């Protein structure tokens, strides 16, 4: 992949300055148009060899464009806080919003390449990370992002020459360290690992651009021109990517489905409820204090029919926990800040670190439920969301998260009864809104959406737990006992 970057490209000083003047003008104009429209964000990844000019390229881009609307991120080895979260967590937190350009010097590629070179991971693990990165970039592209990935390339001799040149100049000598010279010893390993990484992640959604970096002027001008060309093309191309409509998950030739077959008459007597509730709360209290739990996080997602009792179940769970150990996230309509990002962004922000608990009252499944039914997103958006959600949960699980997903189901008659009770009870009136009544009119559409959701996202490792919730006591105990059983199953393996 590097043959064209070994040809000796060079630009003289006069030509460089002549072209840069026009380039700066065009880049500023394109950046202004991008910001005005606010339709998509741009990711510029600057990767490559040590000494290839990654920092200088970033500085040039900053001087050529309006720095107020650029976001620059330089990623080194993960900090302790970052290492306590899933691999992609720190990158999700730094995504630029729509209308802005994010420049990443060091990115989700840097750590896997480095770890493979020093032997911390094998090829199989590297390929797993490559798969994860490809799915992440595909998701960004499907959300409309423009992804530009540059690999700044130097030959081994070119790298050695660059280090010597920098060392001779007192103004730049500090930039060459002992680690840089030691890195020359692993040049061949880097070449091999980088070639594999670039080949496997050179996708149609996010192709790599290899830039020869022997000549500084050629490198910076090439990167700037390519960014401008891609940005202008995207700004003039308003076509939306088309996706085929998917067939139903399963044939609807009768009335049987995962919700209709639930026995909603299940209930508990008060005395039995109180005994089992106290027992489950005691078990949960002890389980989350085990030393083994510090190697995991616990993520609980609650979905359900309106008035199904999600809040009551969450309160019984929280009663068994130390308030310093958990956080409850009530999810409502996205804010303007959240709408400027991929829809999973706001959930990545709240992913807990190891030893902590996150409880989501409503969750990332809103895209395939309310957004689908109410038409807040296009069909292709919610169709691809099933796969993106499965990827998201798998990444969390692979990092040690214990994930449980609950759907609380009640009958239409029980829902009507609870709605009327809320209207008639002073301290419950805040719980009932016009939106709840509107949603009730779409009962059948939500029913179908839930069945599709369960069929497509109830995986073997992270299944849905369907909770019969006509009786609140039964539902609360089932939720608590399910959480305890899952924790015991995982923690027993240590």
Image (cartoon, rainbow, N blue to C red):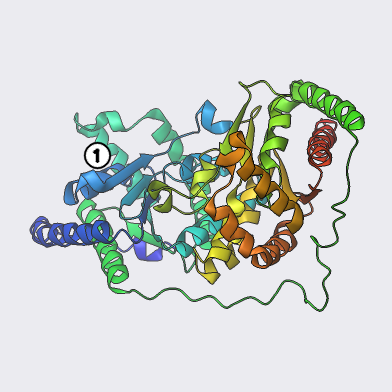
User: Compared with residue 216, is residue 222 higher up or lower down, i.e. above or below?
Assistant: below
Report x, y in % for residue 319.
Answer: 71, 24
Residue shown at 42%/63% (left/top)? 144
**Displayed quadrant of residue 85:** top right
**Displayed quadrant of residue 440:** bottom right
Report x, y in % for residue 71.
Answer: 31, 44
Q: Does residue 72 appear left or right of residue 469 in this picture?
A: left
Which residue matches tag 1?
165
Tell me the quadrant of the picture where the C terminus can be found: top right
Report x, y in % for residue 247.
Answer: 67, 77
**Displayed quadrant of residue 19:** bottom left
* Residue placed most toward the observer, 471 or 449: 471
- Observer able to see residue 333: yes
Report x, y in % for residue 166.
Answer: 25, 37
Residue shown at 54%/49% (left/top)? 433
* Residue placed most toward the observer, 474 or 30: 474
User: Compared with residue 365, is residue 178 higher up or lower down, i.e. above or below?
Assistant: above
Can you name the residue that lies furthest to the front here?
424
Q: Does residue 415 appear left or right of residue 99 in this picture?
A: right
* Residue placed most toward the observer, 335 or 468: 468
Q: Count numbered badges in the picture.
A: 1
Tell me the quadrant of the picture where the N terminus can be found: bottom left
Mark 1 is surrounded, within 10 Å at the Cα level, by few (under 14), some (14 to 19) or many (20 or more) other residues, namely few
User: Compared with residue 243, is residue 167 higher up or lower down, i.e. above or below?
Assistant: above
Provide the secondary structure element on which disc 1 rests.
helix
* Residue placed most toward the observer, 308 or 347: 308
Residue shown at 58%/53% (left/top)? 436
User: Compared with residue 194, is residue 425 higher up or lower down, i.e. above or below?
Assistant: above
- Observer able to see residue 125: no
């Amino acid at each position: 992949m590097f043959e064209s970057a070994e040809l000796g490209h060079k630009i003289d000083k006069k030509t460089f300055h002549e072209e840069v003047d026009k380039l700066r003008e065009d880049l500023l104009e394109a950046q202004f148009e991008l910001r005005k429209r606010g339709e998509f964000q741009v990711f510029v990844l600057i990767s490559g060899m040590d000494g290839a000019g990654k920092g200088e390229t970033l500085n040039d881009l900053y001087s050529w464009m309006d720095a107020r609307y650029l976001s620059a991120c330089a990623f080194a080895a993960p900090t302790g806080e970052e290492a306590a979260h899933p691999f992609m967590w720190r990158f999700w937190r730094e995504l630029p919003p729509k209308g802005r350009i994010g420049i990443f010097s060091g990115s989700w590629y840097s750590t896997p390449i480095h770890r493979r070179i020093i032997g911390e991971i094998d090829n199989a693990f590297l390929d797993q990370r490559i798969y994860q990165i490809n799915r992440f970039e595909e998701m960004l592209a499907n959300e409309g992002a423009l992804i530009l990935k540059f690999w700044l390339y130097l030959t081994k001799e070119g790298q050695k020459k660059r280090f010597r040149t920098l060392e001779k100049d007192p103004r730049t000598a500090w930039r060459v360290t002992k680690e840089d010279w030691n890195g020359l010893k692993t040049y061949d390993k880097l070449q091999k690992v980088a070639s594999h990484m670039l080949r496997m992640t050179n996708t149609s959604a996010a192709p790599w651009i290899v830039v020869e970096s022997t000549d500084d002027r050629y490198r910076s001008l090439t990167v700037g021109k390519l960014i401008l060309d891609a940005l202008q093309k995207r700004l003039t191309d308003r076509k939306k990517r088309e996706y085929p409509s998917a067939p139903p998950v399963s044939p609807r030739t009768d009335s049987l489905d995962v919700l209709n077959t639930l026995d909603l008459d299940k209930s508990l007597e008060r005395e039995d409820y109180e005994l089992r509730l106290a027992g489950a709360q005691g078990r949960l209290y002890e389980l989350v204090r085990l030393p083994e739990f510090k190697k995991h996080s616990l993520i609980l997602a609650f979905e359900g029919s309106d008035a199904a009792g999600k809040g009551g179940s969450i309160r019984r769970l929280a009663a068994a926990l130390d308030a310093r150990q958990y956080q409850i996230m009530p999810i409502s309509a996205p804010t303007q800040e959240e709408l400027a990002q991929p829809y999973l962004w706001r959930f990545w922000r709240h992913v807990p670190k190891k030893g902590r608990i996150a409880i989501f009252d409503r969750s990332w499944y809103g895209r395939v439920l309310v957004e689908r039914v109410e038409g807040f997103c296009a069909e292709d958006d919610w169709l691809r969301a099933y796969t993106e959600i499965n990827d998201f949960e798998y990444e969390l699980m692979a990092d040690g998260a214990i994930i449980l997903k609950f759907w609380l189901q009640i009958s239409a008659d029980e829902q009507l009864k609870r709605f009327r009770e809320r209207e008639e009870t002073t301290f419950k009136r805040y719980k009932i809104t016009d939106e709840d009544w509107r949603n009730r009119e779409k009962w059948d559409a939500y029913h179908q959406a839930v069945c599709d959701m369960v069929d497509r996202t109830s995986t073997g490792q992270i299944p849905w737990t369907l909770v019969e919730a006509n009786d609140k006591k039964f539902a609360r105990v089932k939720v608590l006992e399910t959480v305890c059983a899952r924790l015991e199953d995982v923690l027993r393996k240590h």
